[in-house]
Image (spheres, rainbow, N blue to C red):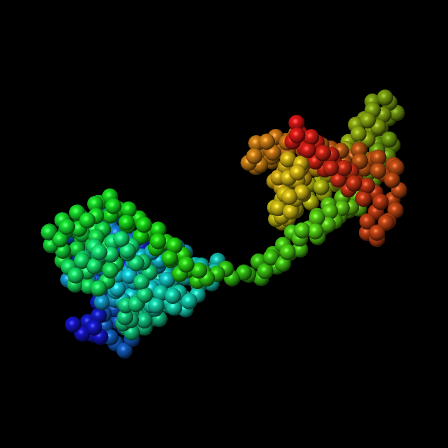
Amino acid sequence: MDRATNLKVALLGTPNSGKSSLFNRLTGMNQRTGNFPGVTVERKSATLVLPNNRQATLTDLPGTYTLYPNGEEERITCEVVRNPQHPDHPDLLVVVVDATQLKRGMILVSQIIDWGIPLVVAVNMSDLIEKEGISLHIDLLAQRLQTPVIALSGLTGAGVKELKAAIAQTPTAATQRIFVPPLDLERYTNTICQWLGTQNSYRAFQALIYPRDFARLSPDQIRQIQAWVSPEQATLHAADEMLLRYDRTEALLQGVLSNKPSASEKLTNQLDRILLHRFGGYTIFGIILMLIFQAIFTWASYPADLIESAFGSLMAWLVKVLPQAWWSNLFINGIVAGLGGIVVFIPQIAFLFFFIALLEESGYMSRVIFLLDRLMRPFGLSGRAIVPLIGGMACAVPSIMMARSIPNPFERLIAIMVTPLMSCSARIPIYILLISMFVPDIRLIGFFSLQGLVMGGMYILGFVTALIAAAILKNT
């Protein structure tokens, strides 16, 4: 048979690797359907037009994960691949591998390489991993496998032209061997190689595992193999092969896939080096907390003054329009003034909730957990406890519920017990009232005021008290 003009090509791959889409792309959907000889498993074949107007017959084989069949369709695929006398036995295999499941597909590729059939590896869906910022180093993989590797997309058609060119070159079988049968089986595989008329020890190894799948073996030879290796031993040898292949293919894929960080990821990595610094990270965290409490005093003062002014104007207007009576005095100086005294603190509470939410949504809170883990371990707490403790600055009740994310029950109980010691938002009016009365509004370091620093110190005092209580609970 002239391989140049009557080339037989077969598509092989794991289920859901995109073989059908690639088959349609290669053949223009000009396919013929039928059954494999002697079975009812459907076969798709078509004419494949190669560069320079060469033609080949392309067959789409049923999907299989390995050359060890589990079902009827996989058995047919293995029979076509392993039996040179089969009418559909290919001169060249195109092994389709899902780029998103590259390691799993490489097990089948490694078996085909060891079997000694010429092949081209088609890495399908490569466009999907590129969208995720993952680089696929095709040249490195081709060098390690000693066989052509083409990145393509059966959905969009990208890379199909390059695949046809690789098929037209009819590459030879790879000379390397990824899996070598164990030495203790060598005396058996050498004999089987003579029976099969081959020098390929892996073919002999598979015949040792599944002798009935090899038509060239006589019944006496099959019985002899079964006397050498029992079915249970054969299953163990096949399992050992898969484990060794997994390790070997993992080494082959080392560096083939690499994350290509985007501009935002690069910025995040640079920020992490600063925010998680073993010394500077704590300083930054302290500065951020001080800025938050400074903002509570400075930014919230403007809406608080407006609210206070609005209630003052409302009370003055009510004094003019309402008659002088006990009930009007109760309404103005009791109900309205009481509501004003409560509403005026809403801006401070709202700003505190806003900043806590900002820390959580920006991802900084998760970095604080990592940063403070070592600091909090001596007190019987992990870094996860910082979530309910920081949340306790807003409200202790939902913060205690946050403690359910702490896996260790002892640490979780300690966090629940000490969270109420944090200064919650209900204490803000008291803090503001006392600080405004007894702490002068003077600037110390430009932007920072003495009142804001004292406010931050109150929260730090609550945090330190919580840690001391945690240490006591840890030891008792």
Quadrant position of residue 118: bottom left
Above or below, 335 relative to 246: above
Q: Position of residue 54 (x, y in %)?
A: 24, 75
Residue at (31%, 58%) from the top-left corner?
A: 179
Q: In front here: 232 or 100?
A: 232
Locate the N terminus and report the quarter of the image it occupies. Answer: bottom left
Above or below, 245 relative to 417: below
Residue at (40%, 61%) from the top-left corner?
A: 252
**Would residue 284 appear left or right of 448 to someone viewing this image?**
left
Q: Position of residue 30 (x, y in %)?
A: 24, 64
**Would residue 143 appear left or right of 84 to someone viewing this image?**
right
Above or below, 63 relative to 376: below
Quadrant position of residue 101: bottom left
Q: In front here: 35 or 279?
A: 279
Residue at (84%, 35%) from the top-left corner?
A: 434
Q: Is residue 130 visible?
A: no
Q: Position of residue 267 (x, y in %)?
A: 61, 59
Q: Position of residue 361 (x, y in %)?
A: 61, 47
